[in-house]
Amino acid sequence: MIERYTLPEMGAVWSEAHKYELWCRVERMVLAAHAAAGTVPQSAVQPVLDAPAPTPAAVAAIEEVTQHDVIAFLSAWADNTTPREAAAYVHFGLTSSDLLDTALAIQLVEASDVLLAKADALVAALRDRALEHRGTLRVGRTHGIHAEPDVFGHRLADFAFGVARSRDRLRVARAAVAVAKISGAVGTYSSVDPALEASVAEGLGLTPADVATQVVLRDGIAEWVSALAILVTVCEAVALEVRHGQRTEVREIWEPFRKGQKGSSAMPHKKNPIMSERIAGLARIVRGYVTPVTEGIPLWHERDISHSSAERIALPDAATATDYLLHLTRRLVEGMVVDAGRMRANLDSTGGLVYTSAVLLDLVRSGLSREDAYALTQAAAMETWEGGAPFRQTLRVRAGEQGVELDEAGLDEAMRPERYVERLGPVFDRVAALS
């Protein structure tokens, strides 16, 4: 991921230097376990423990010749080992994917923990703002058209639970990728005792693979990227709500606009929803990585490396973009400006059309058939749409023409917006308990 969207903590997880530190960590633990089992000389352990990880530049220089990253790493690390002969026992009995898959599992776990912390913070931000606006009336919309009265906190509550569920999916996916594979070529343990794999996995905070060939089957990694894709898409749903609300014709909610910020190089009046639009764009990037990673599940026989090149790009990018996106969405939610007065004005702007559903039910209760009640209500509503007269007025006229007596007290209640949200109390109780 480009530097513009890379935050320091996640950037460190995927740095080349950190990768080689993890490779050293895995190899050291394997070597120590071999020595404890008497497979290799105990004297080889300390020199390897003392040898610093090779620099990315040193590995890259050797890889130019070998065209094999693991061999280049081992050679560069051996150059740092004194005496060099001890390095002969590094990678003893292993194949490249033992190192690659196990170290990658650690990176995925580290990345997951960074993301889970940010997801927790976003859930809390959405929860708090939902409770703040539990009484902020606004119009609910379906198909972009006014529907019935609602409160803005209800919409935010929906997002809070959506992010919480997505976070919980990521927790499950974290467990799916926290798998060590140290079983040698084609995974038969021909040169490695299964007990060694179990010991090293425990030391790394991982679980031994139930079964592996030369690589771990990629279904867990595909699950992990899919969990990220769902999480960022819920963030995009939050951003889309703001983008709509910030439109000039709506002006109900808008992004924070900092002192000195500029909206347009040509039009000084502009306050554009740039955060929300950036969230939408980056969410597309993360979703785009689901397919190439999922296509890494079917490989030729015990392995090929068609998954490797895709994962080198997809996994760091997906994690880094998700990290930035969670950070940005939290900023958006916490800084979001809400205009309750404008929300109420928009609710009232259609002359009472948002109350047709309650009027329809009242007419049915008065004895009209549903078909007749619907026809009467719709006719009055269409007249309001086309002419602009208040719905209550057009309803009275239409009802009078058809000899239908209206219950004025009932209409007062039907056109009281608060009545539409009176039963949302348990929803907000659940929101308040969300963590």
Image (cartoon, helix red, strand yellow):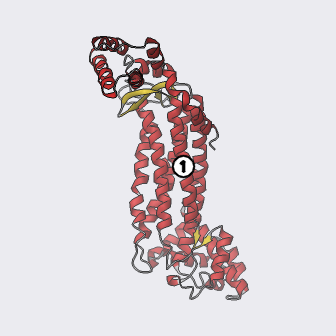
Looking at the image, is 431 positioned above or below residue 360? below
Looking at the image, is 258 positioned above or below residue 201? above
Task: Sort mark 1 into few (<14), some (14-19) or many (20+) by Cα contacts within 10 Å.
Answer: some
Along the horizontal axis of the image, is 109 left or right of 264? right
User: What x and y, as percent, mark residue 140?
Assistant: 43, 29
For label 1, the residue is 165
- Residue drawn 59% across the image and 81% down it: 91
User: Callout 1, which amino acid?
Assistant: Arg
> Can the viewer see residue 129?
no
User: What x and y, as percent, mark residue 374?
Assistant: 32, 25
> Can the viewer see residue 16?
yes
User: What x and y, as percent, mark residue 36?
Assistant: 72, 83
Quadrant containing the C terminus in the rendered view: top right
Along the horizontal axis of the image, is 340 left or right of 400? right
- Residue drawn 43% across the image and 21% down it: 347
- Per the image, label 1 sits on a secondary structure element best described as helix
Q: Closest to the observer: 61 or 178?
A: 178
- Residue drawn 41% across the image and 52% down it: 285
Looking at the image, is 82 positioned above or below residue 244? below
User: What x and y, as percent, mark residue 82?
Assistant: 67, 80
